[in-house]
């Protein structure tokens, strides 16, 4: 059966069937940093850590507390499916009302 919806991925340039999921290369707070602040941040495709005079902010495809961020890293290779984390959504989705936090 043919998919009802298909789209061409901007990242891999292949056509995928089904609804796309939203993703961003970094949390929105990273975007507003100066170049010097970005050099001090730690950013990978999955994680981001930003420090400023008010504290450290940790992101794992969302924003986590220090305790949850450490737990997330500790179980990275062997995740516990029963874990759940409180977090904040740190980007704005197109076509939706404001989704920040």
Image: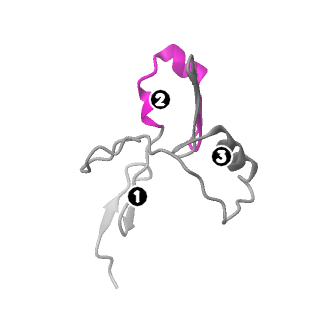
| Quarter of the figure with the N terminus | bottom left
Q: Position of residue 43 (x, y in %)?
A: 58, 33
Of the residues under marks 3 and 2, which one precedes in the sequence? 2
Q: Above or below — where is 85 with respect to 44? A: below
**Residue at the spot of label 2:** 30
Is the residue marked by circle 2 packed among few (<14), some (14-19), or many (20+) residues within 10 Å? some
Q: Which residues are magenta?
A: 27-48
Residue displayed at 41% across by 24% down: 32
Frontmost of labels 3 and 2 is 3
Q: In what element is the residue under mark 2?
A: helix
Cα distance between the residues tagged 2 and 1:
21 Å
Residue displayed at 53% across by 22% down: 38
**Within the image, what quadrant is residue 29 found in?**
top left
**Residue at the spot of label 1:** 21
Cα distance between the residues tagged 3 and 1:
24 Å
Q: In what element is the residue under mark 3?
A: helix
Q: Horizontally, is 9 left or right of 61 in the view?
A: left
**Residue at the spot of label 3:** 68
Q: Which mark is residue 58?
A: none
Is the residue marked by circle 1 packed among few (<14), some (14-19), or many (20+) residues within 10 Å? few
Magenta region includes residue 95: no
């Amino acid at each position: 059966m043919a998919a009802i919806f298909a789209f061409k991925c901007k990242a891999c340039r292949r056509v995928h069937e089904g609804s796309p999921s939203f993703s961003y290369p970094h949390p929105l707070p990273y975007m507003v940093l100066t170049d010097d602040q970005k050099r001090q941040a730690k950013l990978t495709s999955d994680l981001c850590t930003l420090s400023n005079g008010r504290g450290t902010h940790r992101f794992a495809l969302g924003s986590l507390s220090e305790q949850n961020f450490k737990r997330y890293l500790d179980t990275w290779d062997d995740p516990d499916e029963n874990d759940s984390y409180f977090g904040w959504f740190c980007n704005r989705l197109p076509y939706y009302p404001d989704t920040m936090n």
